[in-house]
């Protein structure tokens, strides 16, 4: 059994494929966009522009970017409540996500969902879900629908490592394996369920081994390395599309910020030294250095990309700030497919 | 018109809707090979195959969630709970997922699923198997709640529920499966949200639903032999509630007793009484009374169980009280 589930770098990587250079640069841009977006969201939260709970994705960017990069436009995606990064990586505009965080009518959920409930059905982005583990059976149902209609789509479910001790996880994985459903369970193991370390919550540290209970393919993935993430996801997607079989990916990553905006960066449950140590494997630094080392970008290009991204985020912020609030009559819309008699 | 049992009427509705729409499928424990714990799904596996009549492990939370997910991407699942008592394990999926999806996605993603199975007390099944949960689900905006009392309504309401674009909680009466009645062939659709006058009367309104409809009708016969002519209003759908039907009847009779199987606290009757006192206060000649299940977990012992249930005698006593009769 592993002594810790920290993300570990693998052997020295091979050279990057120059034919994929544009894609590789796009991954960096997406990761930078998520990072700068989340920093801005944190700032907006402190200013009271964003209410409620706000869970930032800083440190985990390579997971969403690498894995979503392996999907097709008609695949189905469900996420937990830490899903700003997935929404952006899937292609929901920074404007629509930021406006949703601001609770504005122009947000991707019309201001009625908020940070934890981002939706864009046109992109197959079927929700941030805010009850831990509850969306795991839901994603399984989407995979059931794929099998039912006999298409080659894939359903992907993102959740944290704390969800694996939840009954919904086991019930769903059992059915997915039993019925051979094209679903990928992507567990983002950032090592803490709020303030409880995995080792204090789970009898088994290696989450991937949970799949053995269901005779399910599984893999441990370094989530700080976007190409590694992408390659593992490609294997899982291939398995789902061609063999119609589920996969559990345990992706080892780390959250550089607190659980939510109301939680300090390290608090009582982890040390400052640990956070600083993990920051040495910042997925954006890891990837940009790799691109530079392989000659696919230079430092100036990275800086320029970052500047471009910051402008996009600034624009999103302005857009969200200036967007209208939902009309008050929206209070009663979309409770039912047709509107019910009102009190 | 053919006479069918309540169970066969439900079976007919399922079969017809599955023939009509190939996105409709049935999923739950023992629905396939076993032919249904209460035989509601008899013959459906043979006709539609295992992709559309799906036996599940005993995993209510899990397969309710599968139903929600399948509905979110365009199928029309009918999720059978062996009983609504077991559905408590799945309540998170109904309340937090099914009921909320349309709203929190700003109308982008609906959940056109039916969750159905038997509710209420049967005979001596004791505390964990004898519960009526309709008021729980009726509390939740985003859900519809349907409680048919007769075979014809069972068929017509289930067809409507399956065609409805909202999540529908469909609670069948466990004691009603063997009851018989005339059921129209083919396209018999009863709209959700409409109550039905099961007995016309003039002296007092009995508001009831599901199994208590037959209890109220028995009470009405006893009362009629004593010169009292009750009107029996079967709510059929709890949410949306047909308030107009209740108020119209009360405007006619000026007296009302609300009957339900469930517990009194925050029960369906509490909601009905609230509407009557707000919207028909001037029509009333007496306070509205309620007859409910006793406010206790259901005991196993036969006599204690009988004492815990709403029965015709309790209804007659309540009616006498609102009529100020001895």
Image (tube, coloured by chain):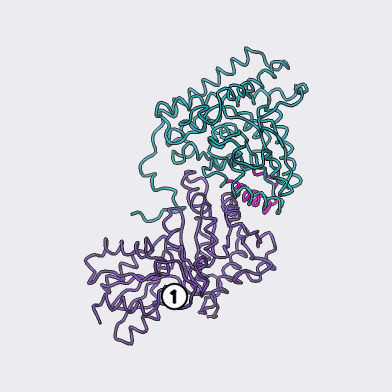
Residue at image position (64%, 35%) is: A68
Residue drawn 47% across the image and 30% down it: A261
Helix, strand or loop at mark 1? helix
Q: Residue furthest bottom?
A: B225
- Give how far across and how far down residue A326 sits, in percent: 39, 38
Q: Quadrant of the N terminus of chain A?
A: top right
Mark 1 Cα-neighbour bin, 10 Å: few <14, some 14–19, many ≥20: few
Q: Nearer the viewer, residue B166 or A161?
A: A161
In the rendered view, tell whether residue A223 sits above or below residue B110.
above
Of A233 and B77, nearer the camera is A233
Q: Residue under circle 1? A: B304
Magenta-highlighted residues: A135-156
Secondary structure mostly taken by the magenta-highlighted segment of the chain? helix
At 73% across and 17% down in the image, what residue appears?
A294
The picture places residue A87, in percent across and down from the top left corner, at 56, 35
Question: In the rendered view, would you say A144 is above or below A20?
Answer: below
B192 to the left or right of A67: left
Looking at the rendering, which quadrant does residue A276 occupy? top right
| Residue occupying the point 40% across, 81% down | B218
Report the label total: 1
In the image, B58 versus A33, the foreground residue is B58
The colour assigned to chain B within the rendered structure: purple
């Amino acid at each position: 059994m592993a002594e810790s589930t920290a993300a570990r770098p693998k052997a020295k990587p091979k050279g990057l494929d120059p034919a994929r250079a544009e894609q590789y640069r796009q991954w960096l841009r997406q990761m930078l966009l998520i990072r700068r977006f989340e920093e801005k969201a944190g700032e907006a939260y402190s200013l009271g522009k964003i209410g409620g709970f706000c869970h930032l994705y800083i440190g985990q960017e390579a997971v969403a970017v690498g894995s979503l990069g392996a999907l097709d436009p008609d695949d189905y995606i469900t996420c937990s409540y830490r899903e700003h990064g997935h929404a952006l990586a899937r292609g929901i505009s920074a404007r629509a996500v930021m406006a949703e965080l601001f609770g504005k009518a122009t947000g991707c959920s019309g201001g009625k969902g908020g940070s934890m409930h981002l939706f864009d059905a046109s992109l197959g982005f079927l929700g941030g879900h805010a009850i831990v583990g509850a969306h795991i059976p839901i994603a399984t149902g989407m995979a059931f629908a794929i099998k039912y209609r006999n298409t080659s789509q894939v359903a992907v479910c993102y959740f944290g490592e704390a969800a694996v001790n939840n009954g919904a996880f086991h019930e769903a994985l059992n059915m997915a394996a039993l019925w051979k459903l094209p679903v990928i369970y992507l567990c983002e193991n950032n090592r803490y369920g709020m303030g409880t370390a995995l080792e204090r919550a789970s009898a088994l540290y290696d989450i991937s081994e949970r799949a053995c209970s269901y005779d399910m393919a599984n893999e441990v993935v370094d989530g700080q390395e976007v190409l590694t993430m992408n390659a593992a996801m490609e294997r899982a997607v291939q398995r789902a599309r061609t063999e119609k079989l589920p996969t559990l990916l345990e992706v080892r990553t780390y959250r550089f910020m607190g659980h939510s905006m109301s939680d300090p960066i390290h608090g009582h449950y982890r040390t400052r030294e640990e956070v600083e140590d993990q920051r040495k494997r910042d997925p954006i630094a890891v990837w940009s250095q790799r691109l530079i080392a392989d000659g696919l970008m230079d430092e100036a290009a990275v800086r320029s990309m970052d500047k471009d991204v910051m402008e996009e985020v600034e624009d999103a912020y302005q857009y969200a700030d200036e967007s209208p609030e939902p009309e008050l009559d929206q209070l009663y819309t979309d409770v039912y497919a047709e509107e019910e008699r009102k009190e | 018109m053919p006479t069918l049992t309540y169970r066969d009427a439900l079976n007919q509705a399922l079969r017809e809707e599955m023939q009509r729409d190939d996105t409709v499928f049935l999923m739950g424990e023992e629905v396939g090979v076993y032919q249904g714990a209460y035989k509601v799904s008899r013959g459906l596996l043979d006709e539609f195959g295992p992709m559309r009549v799906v036996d599940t492990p005993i995993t209510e939370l899990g397969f309710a969630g599968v139903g929600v997910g399948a509905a979110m991407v365009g199928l029309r699942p009918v999720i059978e709970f062996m009983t609504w008592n077991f559905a408590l394990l799945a309540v998170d999926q109904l309340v937090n997922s099914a009921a909320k999806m349309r709203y929190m996605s700003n109308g982008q993603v609906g959940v056109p699923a039916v969750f159905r199975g038997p509710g209420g007390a049967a005979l001596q099944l004791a505390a964990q198997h004898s519960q009526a949960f309709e008021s729980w689900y009726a509390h939740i905006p985003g859900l519809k709640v349907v409680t048919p009392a007769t075979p014809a309504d069972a068929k017509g309401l289930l067809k409507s529920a399956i065609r409805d674009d909202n999540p529908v909680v469909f609670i069948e009466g466990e004691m009603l499966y063997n009851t018989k009645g005339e059921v129209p062939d083919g396209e018999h659709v009863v709209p959700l949200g409409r109550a039905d006058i099961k007995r016309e009367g003039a002296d007092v309104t009995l508001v009831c639903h599901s199994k208590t409809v037959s209890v109220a009708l028995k009470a009405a016969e006893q009362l009629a032999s004593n010169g009292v002519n009750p009107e029996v209003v079967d709510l059929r759908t709890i949410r949306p509630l047909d308030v107009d039907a209740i108020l119209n009847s009360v405007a006619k009779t000026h007296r009302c007793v609300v009957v339900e199987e469930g517990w009194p606290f925050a029960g369906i009757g509490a909601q009905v009484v609230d509407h009557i006192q707000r919207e028909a206060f001037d029509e009333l000649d007496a306070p509205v009374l309620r007859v409910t299940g006793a406010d206790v977990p259901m005991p196993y012992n036969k006599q204690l169980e009988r004492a815990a249930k709403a029965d015709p005698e309790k209804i007659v006593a309540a009616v006498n009280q609102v009529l100020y009769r001895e």
